[in-house]
Image: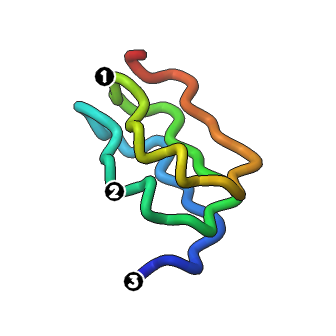
Amino acid sequence: MLKKLEILDLSHNEFEGCVPEQLGNLISLLKLDLSFNGFGCEIPESFIHLKKLEFLDLSFNNF
């Protein structure tokens, strides 16, 4: 559905828990910003599919 999405900014949203595994399905992502949330757990294994990803910000979470 969102396979052509290139930029996703979910920073400053007070999300908690684990980073959703489904984000690894966004295979066209160039930039993913998940900073300033409450994410924890491990980075999903599905992120290996994000081959075009150039920028990933996970700062200020609970990793």
Mark 1 or mark 3: name the one nearer the start of the chain: 3
Give the CA distance from mark 1 to mark 3.
26 Å
Q: Residue at x 41, y 38 (%)?
A: 45
Q: Quadrant of the N terminus?
A: bottom left
**Tag of residue 1:** 3
Which residue is label 1 attached to? 41
**How many circles with numbers are drawn on the protein?**
3
Element type at mark 3: loop
Q: Amino acid at mark 1?
A: Cys
Disc 1: CA contacts within 10 A as few (<14), some (14-19) or many (>=20): few
List the single residue furthest toward the left.
Answer: 17
What secondary structure is found at the residue carrying circle 1?
loop
Q: Determine the residue positioned at 44% across, 23% down.
A: 61
Q: Which residue is at the front of the view, 19 or 50? A: 50
User: Which label sits on residue 63?
Assistant: none
Pointer 2: what residue? 22
Q: For residue 28, which quarter of the picture? A: bottom right
Q: CA distance from mark 3 to mark 2?
A: 12 Å
Residue 7, position as x, y percentages in the image: 63, 64
Question: What is the quadrant of the C terminus in the image?
Answer: top left
Q: Nearer the viewer, residue 45 or 33?
A: 45
Circle 2 crowding by C-alpha within 10 Å: few under 14, some 14–19, many from 20: few
Q: Position of residue 49 (x, y in %)?
A: 53, 53
Q: Quadrant of residue 58?
A: top right
Residue 38 lies in quadrant: top left
Q: Amino acid at mark 3?
A: Met
* Image vertical order of residue 42 relative to residue 57, above or below: above
Relative vertical location of residue 54 with respect to residue 25 in this rendering, above or below: above
